[in-house]
Image (cartoon, rainbow, N blue to C red):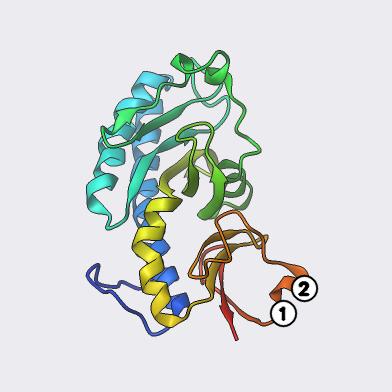
Amino acid sequence: MSIHPATPASRTAADHPVELVTEYFGRALDALDDWRGRLAVEIATARADAPLTTDRLDALVEPSALALFDQLDLPVYGAGFIAALDSLADANSHLAWWQGPERAQLVLAAQSVNKEHIDYSELEWYRVPFQTGMPHVAGPYVDYLCSDEYTITVAAPVHVDSEFVGAVALDLLIDQVERHLTPQLAAFGDDISIVNGVGRVLLSTSPARETGDTIRGDDLVGFERRPCPGMALDVLIAR
């Protein structure tokens, strides 16, 4: 079941900027919510036959991960599954991940020594779904692991019999999101910003604010702050 109200993909306007932002990122949350249930069943079935390895996991994840690129009306840069640490038979950690225009599989070991043993337990896109059991929109952050660009990662936890086995996720590059979303936000005003839970700017209609800037404390004076339901994002609207 969708966790956000359905909105036609062709819609180019909304009644309020919060509605626009919630619908936009809600597309990703709804798609991952659907996928995580199906993947949980597939992982449970696979583990019942034999210990789950990286190769077997990749085979389970790849079809649905690649489908996200075409199914979503979003600029998906990467998609896949982050395995829970120490949950696989042949690796301490593993990202079953496909990305880029070629939708190529990410092979961390080929990029840097020790990356195949990366501890991502403190990274927001893994830590929050693991700790809360809830989907999460993480970012903006520079993704040194995958794209080396400002990124938003949307992730949702996967559980098998109450055991956290990992998280399904997708990446959106900020510059592509800006091209899609900023012109629509600009219809509501010339000083509207999307910020995360700590006040870091994802994007803004104001040229005075850039991705990664912070708006908090005294800086919030003069803004109306409105939360986006179901995600740790707020919209700041200059009064």
Q: Looking at the rendering, which quadrant does residue 208 occupy?
A: bottom right
- Identify whether 210 is placed above or below 37: below
Image coordinates for residue 109, horizontal then vertical, percent? 48, 16
Query: What amino acid type is highlighted by mark number 1?
Result: Val
* Residue extending furthest toward the front: 207
Residue found at x 49% / y 77%: 190
Residue at the spot of label 2: 218
Residue contact between numbered discs 2 and 1, judged by CB atoms under 8 Å: yes
Which quarter of the rendered picture does the C terminus lie within?
bottom right
- Identify whether 7 is placed above or below 176: below
In this rendered view, identify the residue nearer to me: 94 or 217.
Answer: 217
In this rendered view, identify the residue nearer to me: 73 or 4.
Answer: 73
Image coordinates for residue 141, horizontal then vertical, percent? 56, 46
Give the structural element (helix, strand or loop) at label 1.
Answer: loop
Residue at the spot of label 1: 221
Query: What amino acid type is highlighted by mark number 2?
Result: Asp
Residue found at x 54% / y 40%: 164
**Image check: 36 left or right of 135?**
left
Which quarter of the rendered picture does the N terminus lie within?
bottom left
Res 214 visible: yes
Tell me the crowding category of disc 2: few under 14, some 14 to 19, or many 20 or more residues within 10 angstroms, Cα based. few
Image coordinates for residue 8, horizontal then vertical, percent? 24, 72
Q: Looking at the rendering, which quadrant does residue 63 occupy?
A: top left
Image coordinates for residue 178, horizontal then vertical, percent? 41, 59
Res 1 visible: no
Spatial CA span between label 2 and label 1: 6 Å
Tell me the crowding category of disc 1: few under 14, some 14 to 19, or many 20 or more residues within 10 angstroms, Cα based. few
